[in-house]
Image: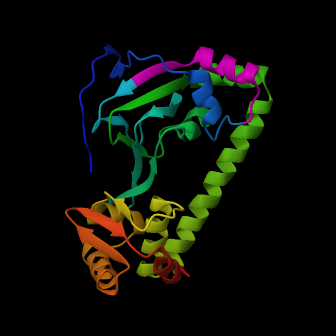
Amino acid sequence: MIHAVSRPGAYEGDMMVSPRRIDKERLLGRSQLFSGLSPQVLSDLASLSITKHVSGGDTIFSEGDPGHSMMAIAEGAVRISAFTPSMRDVVLADLSKGDVLGEIALLDGGTRSAAALALSNTVLIVLERRKFLDAMRRHPEIAEHVLGLLCARVRRADERMMDMGFLSLPARLSKVLLAATGPTSSASQKLSYSQSELADMVGSSRENLNRCLKRWQGEGFVNIKDGWIIVLDRAALEREGS
């Protein structure tokens, strides 16, 4: 679900610059890409970055666009998706505060391998490729962090491919729902994904996904109400995914 709320700000290029001051050094330090770097390195990177705002529902970049920058999310949420060879739009990830996007094109200078959509009003810390490479030459320890993140992304991509190829729909769906809710002691967790969005995420048709959710609703694992999917029994979903 996309909720767009207008916010005042000045325009720069095709995005709107946030009027609020963002602690870029702290944000970059919270991101997976730069966590653990020294204050000196973070300060250098922060000084090279700019802050931009994207309204909810707007495209940040499209698959195939030139990749000249990476972005860290200061506020808001971003959906990453890509088209399959059959031109089906598949959701790859939903990112939130502290997450990084666009880092692959940042390193190789190629085109964007996926599209990014702002799910809500989103504030981004943008670091251009040329400036980033200059900083990496000055601070070689940045390269180690970059390699670690990219290896983690490859592992997740491999896991996703294995899931698509070998796990049943209930197992794939349970993994997505559990990952989206995260570890919690709450009796129930509400998710705002539509069934079409979930079908894209698990590589299924909406009809098959709906049948699975209806079965789980009948067994008390989840509830479907007013557009929400409510996880009621995490242990049962974990069994479905095992």
Name the residue at 65% across, 47% down: 150
Q: Is residue 106 left or right of residue 228?
A: right
Does the image show residue 86?
no
Residue 101 image point, x, y percent: 51, 39
Q: How many marks?
A: 0
Name the residue at 40% across, 51% down: 81
Q: Quadrant of residue 149?
A: top right
Q: Establish if 127 lies above or below 183.
A: above
Q: Establish if 138 lies above or below 190.
A: above
Report if residue 45 lies within the magenta region.
yes
Name the residue at 27% across, 76% down: 210
Residue 94 image point, x, y percent: 43, 50
Q: Establish if 229 lies above or below 25.
A: below
Q: Quadrant of residue 200?
A: bottom left
Q: Residue furthest right?
A: 140
Q: Is residue 61 left or right of residue 32?
A: left
Q: Is residue 204 left or right of residue 167?
A: left
Report if residue 190 lies within the magenta region.
no
Name the residue at 47% across, 40% down: 112
Q: Nearer the viewer, residue 188 or 170?
A: 188
Which residues are drawn in magenta?
Answer: 36-52
Residue 160 image point, x, y percent: 53, 66
Tell me, what colour scheme is on the image?
rainbow
